Amino acid sequence: MSGVFEGYERQYCDLSANLSRKCNAAALLPDGEQKNQEISEIKSGLDDADVLIRKMDLEARSLQPSLKATLLAKLREYKSDLNTLKRDIKKLTVPSSSQAAHEALLESGLAEVSANQRERLMMSTERLNQSTDRVKESRRLALETEDLGVSILEDLNQQRETLLQAHTKVHPFTFSEVFCSQLTGKKKGSILLTPVLDSNSRMI
């Protein structure tokens, strides 16, 4: 590899790393004189980096074809790196413009939404609302069924207590009535037998 190209390459790599650090530090600074000074130094460094890129390009093109192709491929990576640094420093100097561009891009993206897509979105929303209504109705019916079941159980318990109370009152009365009926029957039998015995006694 060309010694001249390697010398330019080392200078560029050192300068690029230094500019990247300065750019990151400047992004954290508040707007003011210090930030403007840092941005000015970074821009000066970018100019130096451009000079080194041009020198490497001239040196690579003066070499043999096999070596030139390798160096030019490496040089394209350095150019891409330098362009990234330039975009970063531009964001620091015109943040409002960048924000405006971002908002414009967002609006253009929204404008590209087709009518069919909007219609599908509306249909999906409607189906979601219908599903929500069905869920609410199912919950309402479940609560009504639960309340009805509780009411039926309460009625059954009341009827059971009423039947038990009625059974308790009726059972002693029935037993007494039967007992009295039996006694009455015995007394009638005694009365019927008494005249017969008296008559027999007189007959004797």
Image (cartoon, helix red, strand yellow):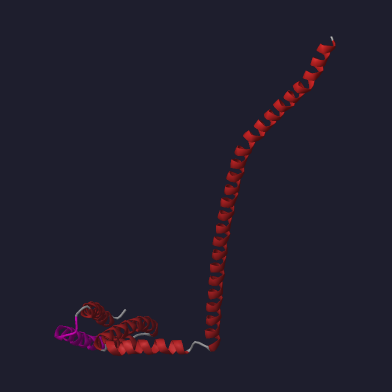
Point out the residue furthest to the top here: 204
Q: Is residue 113 left or right of residue 63?
A: right
The region drawn magenta spans 30-50
Relative horizontal placement of residue 100, taking residue 164 as reference (left or right): left
> Which of the 4 image quarters holds residue 43?
bottom left
Q: Residue at x 79, y 22 (%)?
A: 192
Q: Which residue is pictured at 53% across the width and 71% down the height?
A: 132
In the displayed structure image, the side of residue 157 where residue 57 appears, left or right: left
> For the view shown, which residue lies furthest in the left direction?
33
Q: Is residue 186 above or below residue 45?
A: above
Q: Main secondary structure of the magenta part?
A: helix
Task: Examine the image and state in which quarter residue 93 appears.
Answer: bottom left
The residue at the far right in this view is 203
- Asked whether 12 or 160 is in front, the reply is 160
Percent across and percent down for residue 125 are 52, 78
Name the quadrant containing residue 146.
Answer: bottom right
Q: Is residue 41 magenta?
A: yes
Q: Position of residue 141 (x, y in %)?
A: 57, 64
Where in the figure is residue 7, as x and y percent of width and height? 24, 80
Work out whether residue 62 can be spotted. no
Q: Nearer the viewer, residue 15 or 83?
A: 83
Front-most of 148 and 92?
148
Q: Is residue 67 found inside the magenta-colored segment of the image?
A: no
Q: Is residue 115 visible?
A: yes
